[in-house]
Amino acid sequence: MADTAHQPPQIRLAEPHDIEILPGIERSAARLFRTWADDLGLPRNLLAEPNAVDTFRSAQQAGRLWVACDSGGTPVGFALVVELGGFAHLDELDVLPEYGRQGVGSALLATVCAWARQHAFPAVTLRTFRRVPWNAPFYGRRGFREGDSATLSIEHARLDVMEQQRGLRPEMRVTMAYDT
């Protein structure tokens, strides 16, 4: 059950014991896309494929994985960052649906942007869906701007191609960046 009294989320670096919880958070958040899947050209099999535990473990060990916790200290959301073409790239940000619209995603995003600034990354980049309200519009309201992957780096351009190979429709996707 979600916290009620508008408590600010507790954001911290992920710890090893958090890792096993994160795929479940990712799967729960992905369920929100079910009704959008056909319009987005989102292959349904992608909704059931969370990041590998090894991906989370590597990010945790590198200090690039944060969790948002409820008042009891249990993770209810996370942000995973990778370095991509010299940028801090937000690879995944997920929040349990019952904690949505409570500032959890915003707090995770602010933490990532502050971390990127402290580590002298020129920007935080991400790929997201153009028309899903909790995707591009959410990031746009927080200072992210649309951009062209090819102008950022060859790695960003390759990411676009990889998404297309996985079946995502390019006209539905957008690259965004937040200058630190």
Image (tube, rainbow, N blue to C red):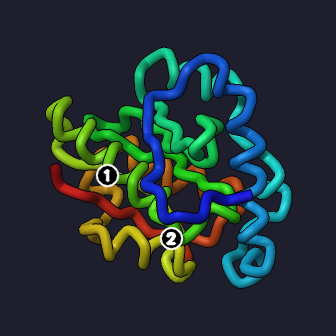
Identity of the residue furthest to the front in this view: 5
Left or right? Give the position of 2 relative to 108.
right
* Residue 96 location (% of width, % of height): 67, 56
Tell me what residue is drawn at x 39 percent, y 54 percent.
Answer: 107
Mark identifier at residue 161: none
Would residue 96 be seen by someone viewing this image from the given angle? yes
Left or right? Give the position of 148 relative to 80.
left
* Residue 37 location (% of width, % of height): 76, 75
Left or right? Give the position of 178 relative to 164.
left
Q: Which of marks 1 and 2 is in front?
A: 1
Picture mark count: 2
Q: Quick one: 118 or 129, which is closer to the camera?
A: 118
The residue beneath circle 2 is 135
Tell me what residue is drawn at x 51 percent, y 22 percent.
Answer: 60
Tell me what residue is drawn at x 42 percent, y 29 percent.
Answer: 64
Tell me what residue is drawn at x 30 percent, y 68 percent.
Answer: 142
Mark identifier at residue 110: 1
Residue type highlighted by circle 1: Ala
**Sequence order check: which comes first, mark 1 or mark 2?**
1
Would residue 171 be seen by someone viewing this image from the given angle? no
